[in-house]
Image: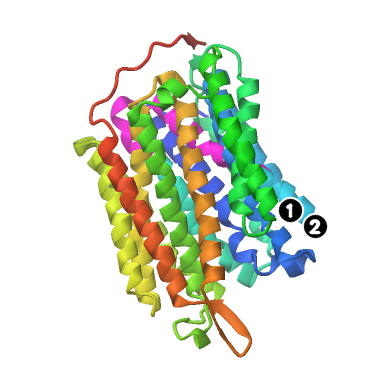
Amino acid sequence: MSVRPAARPRLVLAALAFCGVLVSISQTIVVPLLPELPAITHSPASDVSWLITVTLLTGAVFTPLLGRAGDMYGKRRVLLIALSSMIIGSLLCATSSNLSVLIVGRAFQGAAVAVVPLGISILRDELPPRRVIPSIAIMSSTLGIGAAFGIPAATLVVEYANWHAMFWINLGLGVLDIVLVLLIVPESAIRTSGRFDILGAVGLSAFLVCLLLAVSKSSAWSTTTIVGLSVVAILLVPLWGWYELRTKSPLVDLRVSARPAVLFTNLGALLIGFAFYANSLSTAQLVQEPTWTGYGLGESIVVSGLCLLPGGVAMVLLSPVSARISSARGPRFTLGIASVLMAAGYVVRLFTSSNVAGIVIGATVVSAGTAVAYSALPALIMHAVPVTETAAANGLNTLMRTIGQAICSTIVASVLAGVTISSGGRVAPALSAYLIVFVIAGISALVAAGLVMFIPARRPEPVPVEVTVR
């Protein structure tokens, strides 16, 4: 297939954005199905929760690893590997109702999150400079856009078709993604020399597994196990850091990561990820709460999913707007106003939990802020790291968002399970539980806005690196 040079940048962006949206959808499509899966798989709910946990784990572990591999061995090549992982996972989930097989399939799907930072790096390498910031804004936002559209789409499939259908659809679109990438997306000639840091990868993976298991399973596993995992995670940090600082080709360049422009952007990404995920989790459940609670609307699963749809539309529309703001005022300014907008959305949510329209307005405001924030984060990272470390650095930034989402999932579940009301033997979260979630998420967004003040306004000088052009 031949593509006219003038059209190529748009086609490359379209192909990569389609990949990002699909991968993000694959992470969330199982959420509406969770209440039904214990009966479908003949398994307890605590075991079914692994369908979410394992996706967070593999996404967190493989995003920085595949990002670094992309910098070294070719970003398009590794992107295709990540898409293939999603296809394998979709096939396993589409052809089985066995929980063990579903968990393995979801693990493969989780690893595909690396598609987004890899796509951002390809755009930086291949697009004309004037197109880079607007394009990466759209690519970064696909993480939120896919999640916002994925849950409503999955609710419709669950309601009106066999639940396996959503995985078959995901598989088919994944194959289409691979074809588009092969036909349209070029392989970058920019590579980082050196050997892949296997020991550093093992150390980072062990730390992330221990940390995320301690966070996500804190309410299900014994205190002794959680404390043990936490201690191991804490002990691994200095050992891994010591090794990374002394190895010639580290998996994560800690000296670059310690720069204020990178460090505070990554901390902000963690908090933004937390605030974004709280919006999705609380909205879907709040709308379905029974009417006997006094505040519940008793709506169907389809209605709860559709309440997130306007937020997805807002994210699509605002991604280009965010790029224009970043071009005019800088991504630092953009991230600051985005964080404040998210916090304002949670203020709205504090007073609009009694009707669907109010809930949709509040959730959409938060989604709008998320779109602007997600668009600004990779621009800040790219201004602070060498071109040869783009995929790895954006992979680390995506990892921080994932950790924020994992922490959010645990805190939201704990609050909703701990602050309850009961009537006639029935138990449900109290309205105050949701308000507590909104307050915590709003504070997270405000702290992210405060961290922006520590990000340097000027771009630091890049460190000298050896570049191999093939």
The residue at 53%/24% (across/down) is 241
Question: Is residue 169 placed above or below 257 in the rendered structure?
Answer: below
Pointers 1 and 2 in contact (CB under 8 A)?
yes
Q: Is residue 22 visible?
A: yes
**Residue at far bottom of view:** 424
Mark 2 neighbour density, 10 Å: few (under 14) some (14–19) many (20 or more): some
Q: Is residue 101 magenta?
A: no
Please state if 399 lies on the left or on the right of 461 as rendered: right
Picture coordinates of residue 167 (x, y %)? Answer: 66, 54
- Where on the picture, by quarter, is residue 361? bottom left
Can you identify the residue that label 2 sits on? Answer: 98
Residue situated in front as seen by the camera: 47 or 69: 47
Residue in the picture at 55% in, 63% down: 414
Classed neighbour count for the residue bearing mark 1: other residues with Cα under 10 Å, few (<14), some (14–19), many (≥20)? many
Q: Left or right? Give the position of 282 relative to 371.
A: right
Amino acid type at circle 2 is Asn
Residue at 20 percent of width and 38 percent of height:
329
Q: Which mark is residue 102?
A: 1
Q: Relative to 380, say whether 126 is above or below.
A: above
Point out the stretch of residues depicted in magenta.
108-136
Dot 2 falls on a residue whose secondary structure is loop
